[in-house]
Image (cartoon, grey):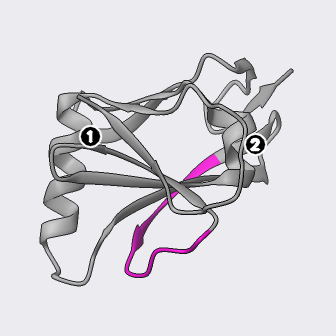
Amino acid sequence: MHTAHSVTPAVTPVWKGLTLTHRAAEQISYLSLREPNIKGVQLDVKTSGCAGLSYTMNLVTEISTDVLMFSRNRACVFVPLKAMPYIDGTEVDYVSIGLNQMFKFNNPLAHQACGCGESFAVE
């Protein structure tokens, strides 16, 4: 079961949320357990690439007040409220492609992606 908790007490829009596959949750838990002060990962977007936006993921040691938390088992993903209009409804997966392993974002809001797959745009 996936749960979302608002760290901010302010009234916010109703979001569909973020889901984590079993593999993504396992990898986030693995990354989080490597150091005792890691609380999880933060998923955000930044302006980048030919299509306009790209995903960023960083380890979190302190939880800010303007985020939503999504969890599965022991894995926690923190998303800044400002990023939710761009990634609401996204499924986060962890995949193996050849010798590479990476997080993959299945974002229903992404209507355009650049040729190299590094950036996306929403309508």
**Residue 15 at what x, y percent from top left?**
62, 31
List the residue tagged with mark 2: 53
Of badges 2 and 1, the one in the foreground is 2
Secondary structure of the residue carrying tag 1 is: strand
Mark 2 to mark 1 CA distance (whole Å): 22 Å
Q: Is residue 24 left or right of residue 49?
A: left
Q: Amino acid at mark 2?
A: Leu
* 31 or 76: nearer the viewer: 76
**Residue 58 at what x, y percent from top left?**
46, 66
Q: Earlier in the sequence, mark 2 or mark 1?
A: 2
Secondary structure of the residue carrying tag 2 is: strand
Q: Is residue 62 left or right of residue 74?
A: right
The relative height of residue 8 versus residue 91 in the rendered view (above or below) is below
The quadrant of the image that shows the N terminus is top left
- Picture disc at residue 101: 1
- Picture disc at residue 39: none
Quarter-of-image position of residue 72: top left
Quarter-of-image position of residue 10: bottom right
| Residue range (magenta) | 55-65
Q: Amino acid at mark 1?
A: Gln
The quadrant of the image that shows the C terminus is top right
Is residue 10 within the magenta segment?
no
Quarter-of-image position of residue 24: top left
Query: At x 62% / y 39%, what residue is drawn?
Result: 118
Q: Circle 1: is it few (<14), some (14-19), or many (20+) Cα within 10 Å?
A: few
Q: Is residue 34 left or right of residue 40?
A: left
* 7 or 48: nearer the viewer: 7
